[in-house]
Image (cartoon, grey):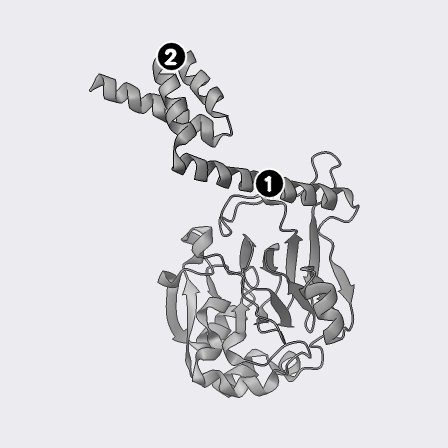
Amino acid sequence: MQVEQRYESDLAVFASALVEGASVQDAVARCTALGLPDDVGRKLTSALSTHKMFSLLNRRDTTLRSLNWLIQAYSTLDQKSGVPSRLDRVSSISPEDFLERYYFANRPVLIHGLARDWPATKKWQPEYLKERCGNIDVDVLAGRDAAPANFRNNGMELKQRVRFSDFLDKAFSGVPDNDTYLPARTLFFANPGTAPLLDDVPCPDFMEHAVSHLRCWIGARGTRSEYHFDTPSALFVQLVGTKRFEILAPWHIDLKDDTPWKGIAPRLVDPDTGQSLTRSVLLEPGDAIFIPVGWWHSVEALSPSISLNFLKFKGVVNRFSPW
């Protein structure tokens, strides 16, 4: 038993060294320094040098190191550009320019006043919404404050069905509330009772008006979405109220935990220059922001808020999920 435990201990040290990037010889040297007999070390070296699985893992490690180097290069270039996580601001844009300059370039852009004249922007106040569909039941997520960050917008175990008019009263009461929210994942427009509202939502020129790719966010002042990235690109349109976005370029993975919804606040400044690495932007009613796939962002409602996500872009397949 003691021999087996010692062998397992040596393998653990050996494996840890390899995971940390040590060569086989260096890994053996570490074990030898802890008392591993030389002959065992030589056998480990010989076995691993010819093992197909180790060869495969070694190639994978080389690939990951190359990708990490490339990401670090992009991160360095972004930090030294003088405008980290660049965010352009325009008042209008053609579909051709949008696709070429932003969608395919994977760059965010703020479009001032895109939805300023939409009926939804002008009409979607609580009384109007109650008149149109206040008697339907809708899904919301409740108990968000006590849930892990990665469940607050996606955890279906938080889902509750409530009367829409009651939810609107709570969301627009003026009392800050992050605990109850109607986020995109609840599929608001999948409810047939919301159909009358779709007449108030025109389609931007570079989007396709597909209800199955339209999402809605409704919440009180103080609702928040922690830093995360999304696997499709999205056009986020602010209809009612004001939201603050913090945008961070995707290659700053060294500032984040290794999963998209951990909710851990990143280090937001360049340690060498003290310069902010994020772009902060306020979305007023009628404004829209394009959030490209992979870009980190956090969102906070500064007032009772209604927003839409458009996910179907003309002429492209907007899906990049690795899961």
Name the residue furthest left: 1
To which residue does mark 2 refer? Answer: 38
**SS category of the residue bearing label 1:** helix
Q: Is residue 35 visible?
A: no
The residue at 47%/60% (across/down) is: 153
How many C-alpha atoms fall within 10 Å of the one at disc 1: few (<14), some, or many (≥20)?
few
Q: Residue 28: where, in percent of width, then height?
A: 43, 19
Report the mark closest to the observer, 1 or 2: 2
How many C-alpha atoms fall within 10 Å of the one at disc 2: few (<14), some, or many (≥20)?
few
Left or right, 50 with respect to 81, comes to: left
Name the residue furthest front: 50
Closest to the observer: 108 or 146?
108
Left or right, 15 with respect to 294, comes to: left
Residue 210 occupies quadrant: bottom right
Q: Residue 30: where, in percent of width, then height?
A: 44, 17
**SS category of the residue bearing label 2:** helix
Q: Quadrant of the N terminus?
A: top left
Q: Is residue 77 above or below residue 54?
A: below
Q: Is residue 41 above or below residue 139?
A: above
Closest to the observer: 102 or 31?
31
Tell me the amino acid under the disc marked 2: Asp
Left or right, 284 with respect to 65, comes to: right
Q: Quadrant of the C terminus?
A: bottom left
Q: Earlier in the sequence, mark 1 or mark 2?
A: 2
Report if the CB atoms under discs 1 and 2 are less than 8 Å apart. no
Question: Where residue 171 is drawn, which disc sits there?
Answer: none
To which residue does mark 1 refer? Answer: 66
Q: Residue 284: where, in percent of width, then height?
A: 69, 68
Q: Is residue 173 above or below residue 84?
A: below
Q: Is residue 51 above or below residue 212?
A: above
